[in-house]
Image: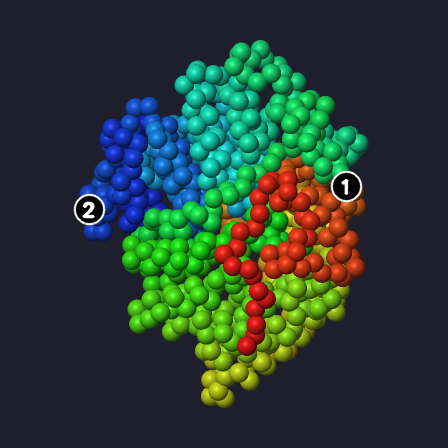
Amino acid sequence: MTDLWPRLARLLAQAERPARYINHEWGATAPVPGTSYREPATPDLGLGASITASGMSAPVPGVYRFCMVYPDTYELGQPNQALRILCKAVNAQEGMSAERAFLPAPDFCDLMRQEGLPLFSLEGCAPLAQFDALGITLSHELVASNILEVLDLAGIPLHAADRDDSHPLVIGGGPVAYNPEPFHLFFDAFSLGEGEESVPELLHEHRRCKQAGMGRADTLRRLALVPGTYVPSLYVGLGQEEAQARGTWLVPAPRQDALSREAPRQDAPCQEAPRQDTLSRDTLSRDTVPVFRRRIFTGFSQSPAWEPCVVPFIETVHDRLNVEVLRGCTRGCRFCQAGMIYRPVRERPAEQIVSAVLEGLEATGYDEVSLTSLSTTDHSQIAAILTRLNQACEGKGIRISIPSQRLDAFGVSMAGLVAGRKKGGLTFAPEAGTQRLRDVINKNVTEDDLFNAIDAAFAAGWRHCKLYFMLGLPTETDDDVKGIASLAQRAYDRAREAVPPGMRGSIKMSVSCALFVPKPHTPFQWDGQIPPDEAMRRVNLLRSSVKYRAITVNWHDPATSLIEAALSRGGRECAAWIEGAWRRGARFDAWSECFNAQTWEDAAVTLGFTPAEAASRSWDTAFIPPWSHIDCGVETGFLRRERQRAALGQTTPDCSFGSCEACGLCPRYQVEPMTQEPRKEASHE
């Protein structure tokens, strides 16, 4: 592999933050000659030899090389747990090696193009185009243009159809891959679901194909047989009318080539999926509906909670030790994609979590740890975990944080357990301003839950609180918008009452409003987004309804939310739109200073595509959406029932606290929720 370090080193003086590109952070890994095992690199904190030479040995002959790419800057990508998990999983495989790569900042992207320097991996400073495979994580829709920026900067053809055997396999994954169609032109394959086991399996199969001398077409057909893998080039998209009539947007593409004897006989792997959601997984036929199941890592609860991690030289987002304490959430919020695609609930045991935190703090030197999950306070042993951590960290200046608190789980006892001596801000997410709308979205919290949480938090010493809401939720009215202002003001009043009179001036409360983006595989996937002008009308209504100057109101740009919604709900027609926007200069669209709506508008006009229509269109629940061939485990029938219950304002309880709610996941995937103890509803005492 080519070592690009001598060329990169000459450019670092012109970089805004050179540490983004130099590797050798504490805990980073480097290849060891003669083996595929990777030892920790020893960083030179004086920035001496470690930035004048790459320090990388020649690649080991026969080692399969994989690079995990985050399509944004180092500061945003390095804390991403998927990178850490997947790199570790691949490095643990005999004869395989994994490295990291990030998209340089915009100014450095331009400098690299000017100098003809291709995009490189961090550990080996090797060109991405020389790896065997690349994994690109799709964390949100606004990374769309950055994917093309990565491929172009790496010198890899944008379209999978234009690549040959000399190019790496390009694999996509992450939450956005649950509707892969807007990206179908750019990826060779998608790995669906949790990748601890599936990604190494996919890479092993790719290595076997390479060793057997298979061509790219045969290889892709072979990879498509790996469970959890979707190869879009093996299927042809249908128009909407035909898709609704046939019950699918995809049919297998006709075979154009004579395949080798080792290749599978069917044109493309298909699994029968009748509309009634009763799936037969043994049938392979061109006349059946293609369905692709996500993978679930059933060994999560027994897997080590401490995974050696990199400590960056520069400050990153979430710059702390992160320990994943549980995976999955069945609270059932009807707008929440994560609550559907990460089921079932799987908890790690308290002993394992506490040991991991203490080992991680010792190994990294961090003074803050975040117990991460979709709903950490739902862990059946959370009180014991926090009690033991508080005792172990007493007097050490270590802060233990929990992301976005559950309102109905944050009582006096919980406030005391997470208080500690170093208190930052607290975040609560009522999501809606009225109980009617909270019932529609199945939030299952009340005003009293919020007020009790505020009382407990501010009495325990907190002074800053952020409240998250969504605007434009299905059935929302102006009264619901005004309800946000009313709820925030009453919460502020409760906070003032909970603190001594002399400290009331230090109270800060903010309201942050995101615009509802309908997501695939949720009960609201059939609902459209409100138009940008209507969104701004509701924002202004909210701002004028908040009478307290001490409460600040923040909101997301409706223009970026429209792009998100159009890509979230779009089909294959969106791929040309993404490419057109990128060719007009779109990149780093999640950055407000870089986002240019005109590039997307111009690309849409050229194609005759209407993003506003794609974002705002609503469908009957009988409509089959463009992502129907992706099986997240939750049955479509369950989503339809939940949408009907939403219209009636009926709530659905969390199955992890009681009986099964028949989402269909457990019997079809042969999995079960795994909690360490029976879950109990939290008390506010």
Image position of 596 (left or right of 619): left
Tag 1 or tag 2, which sits nearer the N-term? 2
Neighbourhood count class around disc 1 (C-alpha, 10 Å): few under 14, some 14–19, many 20 upward: some
Q: Is residue 103 at all visible to an observer of this figure?
A: no
Within the image, what quadrant is residue 532 found in? bottom right
- Viewer-nearest residue: 320 or 330: 330
* Residue at 49 percent of width and 27 percent of height: 157
* Residue type pointed to by label 2: Gly
Q: Locate the C terminus and report the quarter of the image it occupies.
A: bottom right
- x, y percentage for residue 384? 44, 65
Q: Which mark is residue 623?
A: 1
Image position of 100 (left or right of 255): left
- x, y percentage for residue 307? 37, 48
Within the image, what quadrant is residue 491 found in? bottom right
- x, y percentage for residue 504? 50, 84
Query: In the displayed structure, would residue 456 be above or below residue 328?
Result: below
- Viewer-nearest residue: 462 or 472: 462
* Residue type pointed to by label 1: Phe
* Residue at 72 percent of width and 23 percent of height: 287
Label 2: which secondary element:
loop
- x, y percentage for residue 30? 28, 38
Q: Locate the N terminus and report the quarter of the image it occupies.
A: top left
Q: Which mark is residue 109?
A: none
Q: Which mark is residue 48?
A: 2
- Viewer-nearest residue: 571 or 328: 328
* Residue at 75 percent of width and 48 percent of height: 640
